Amino acid sequence: MKINKDMKIIEVLDVNRNTALVFQSYGMGCIGCLAASGESVEEAAAAHGINVDELVAKLNEVCK
């Protein structure tokens, strides 16, 4: 399954738990965050000042 910016963080983590390492590398504590179930990758990236396209590319790299 390909990760996209509209997916909720919890959905991304469900696809591949190793994506948590990508989120952490960007300083995003998304694993324990309550917003993970309702916040999209794009929303989280914006909140943290992260380029969403770069983040999505790294997440998909982990899922290969």
Image: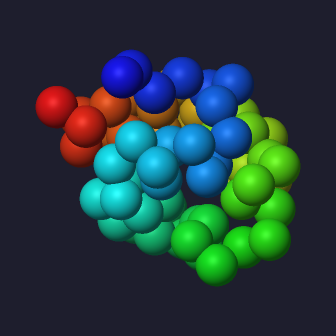
Q: Total of numbered circles in the picture?
A: 0
Q: Residue at x 68, y 41 (%)?
A: 8
Give the farthest residue toward the left: 64
Q: Which image quadrant: the C terminus?
A: top left
Quarter of the image holding residue 7?
Answer: top right
Quarter of the image holding residue 40?
Answer: top right
Q: Residue at x 69, y 25 (%)?
A: 6
Q: Position of residue 36 (x, y in %)?
A: 71, 59
Q: Position of residue 15 (x, y in %)?
A: 40, 42
Residue 46 in view here: no
Pick whichever, 48 or 29, lies toward us.
29
Question: In the image, is 40 to the left or to the right of 23?
Answer: right
Q: Which image quadrant: the N terminus?
A: top left
Q: In the displayed structure, would residue 13 be above or below residue 43? A: below
Q: Residue at x 80, y 71 (%)?
A: 34
Residue 11 in view here: yes
Q: In the displayed structure, would residue 41 be above or below residue 48? A: above
Pick whichever, 50 or 36, lies toward us.
36
Give the farthest residue toward the front: 14
Which scheme is used to colour this image of the protein? rainbow
Q: In the displayed structure, would residue 57 be above or below residue 35? A: above
Q: Position of residue 54 (x, y in %)?
A: 45, 32
Q: Position of residue 41 (x, y in %)?
A: 65, 40
Pick whichever, 45 or 36, lies toward us.
36
Q: Residue at x 35, y 65 (%)?
A: 21
Quarter of the image holding residue 43?
Answer: top right
Question: In the image, is 56 to the left or to the right of 29?
Answer: left
